[in-house]
Image: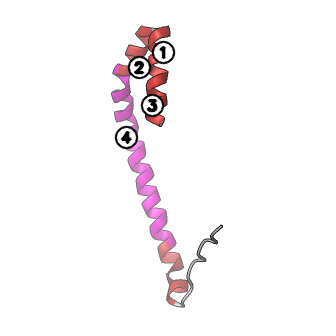
């Protein structure tokens, strides 16, 4: 659904201001490449925090604590 909204927005921009729409189409891969390192840093920090959580909760898990299951409803 998100892709459809983006496509619809680009088509609207193309009708209203076609040079800007074509510029956006050409520059999108460049912007994606520039943002790639930030995504990799985010993935790394997410993995680091998951590792820290696993290490900190290890004693409780060894003693038999289990996370509460979600209540159906």
Q: How dense is the environment of label 4, judged by Cα within 10 Å: few (below 14), some, or many (20 and up)?
A: few
Query: Cα distance, mark 4 to mark 3?
Result: 23 Å
Few, some or many residues within 10 Å of mark 2 (<14, 14–19, 20+): some
Residue 12 lies within the magenta run: no
Q: CA distance from mark 1 to mark 4?
A: 26 Å
Assess whether mark 4 and mark 1 are in contact (beta carbons under 8 angstroms). Answer: no
Give the residue drawn at x 66%, y 67%: 73
The tag earlier along the polypeptide, 4 or 3, is 3
Q: Nearer the viewer, mark 3 or mark 2?
A: 3
Q: Which residue is mark 4?
A: 36
Q: Are marks 1 and 3 in contact (CB under 8 Å)?
A: no
Q: Which residue is mark 3?
A: 4
Q: What secondary structure do most residues of the magenta stretch adopt?
A: helix
Q: CA distance from mark 1 to mark 3?
A: 14 Å
Task: Look at the image and say whether residue 38 sits in the magenta stretch.
Answer: yes
Q: What whole-number distance in Å separates the C-alpha atoms at marks 3 and 2?
A: 17 Å
- Above/below status of 39 relative to 17: below
**First in residue order: circle 2 vs circle 1:** 1
Residue in the picture at 55% in, 82% down: 66
What range of the chain is rendered magenta?
A: 26-53
64 lies left or right of 24 = right
Question: What label sits on residue 24 in the rendered view?
Answer: 2
Q: Which residue is under mark 1?
A: 13
């Amino acid at each position: 659904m998100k892709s459809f909204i983006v496509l619809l927005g680009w088509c609207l921009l193309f009708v209203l201001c076609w040079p800007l729409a074509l510029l956006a189409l050409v520059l999108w891969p460049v912007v994606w490449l520039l943002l790639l390192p930030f995504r990799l840093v985010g993935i790394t920090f997410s993995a680091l925090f998951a590792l820290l959580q696993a290490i900190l909760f290890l004693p409780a898990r060894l003693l038999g604590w289990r996370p509460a299951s979600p209540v159906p409803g």
